[in-house]
Image (tube, grey):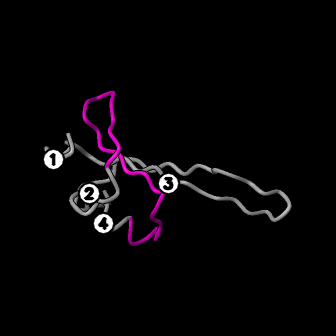
Amino acid sequence: MVKLGDLLKVIELDGPNLKVYTKVSPYESRRIHPSQLSNYLTREVTSVCFETLDIDYDDYCAEVAVNVTIEGPLLEEEK
């Protein structure tokens, strides 16, 4: 499995188009605040989902969002 820190080096994406979630139960995930991502860089990635946000058919330009889920748990300071 790949670690979150290694994945972030490869995709070189940040800001509003990158959302990282951690599993807090078998059926629930919580989003990690971007300022806290450095606390989770050693966690293993369990899934990556790419989605197209907007397509401009005239320019053939698409904006892509990346949703990453990592292994839990959520750190205590974020609960």
Front residue of 76/62: it is 76
N-terminal of the pair, mark 4 or mark 3, is: 4
Residue reaching furthest to the top? 27
Q: Which mark is residue 66?
A: 3
Q: Is mark 3 on a helix, strand or loop?
A: strand
Disc 2 residue crowd, few under 14, some 14–19, many 20+, Cα 10 Å: few
Rendered residue at 25%/63% (across/down):
38
Residue at which label 1 appears: 77
In this picture, residue 20 sits left or right of residue 54? left
Between 18 and 68, the residue placed more toward the observer is 18
The quadrant of the image that shows the N terminus is bottom left
Q: Which of 62 and 7 is in front in this view?
A: 62
Residue at position x 25%, y 62% in the image: 41
Answer with left or right where residue 22 lies relative to residue 14: left
Q: Looking at numbered disc 4 in the image, what kind of residue is underneath it?
A: Gly
Residue under circle 2? 36
User: CB under 8 Å between callouts 2 and 1?
Assistant: yes
Tell me the kind of residue under disc 3.
Val
The residue type indicated by label 1 comes to Glu
The residue indicated by pointer 4 is 5
From the top left corner, tell me how far across and down residue 48 is, in percent.
Answer: 45, 50
- Rounded to the nearest whole Å, what is the CA distance between mark 2 and mark 3? 17 Å
Q: Distance between the residues labelled 2 and 1?
A: 10 Å
* The image quarter in which residue 23 lies: top left
Task: State which tag comes first along the sequence, 2 or 1.
Answer: 2
Membership of 16 in magenta stretch: yes
Residue range in magenta is 8-32
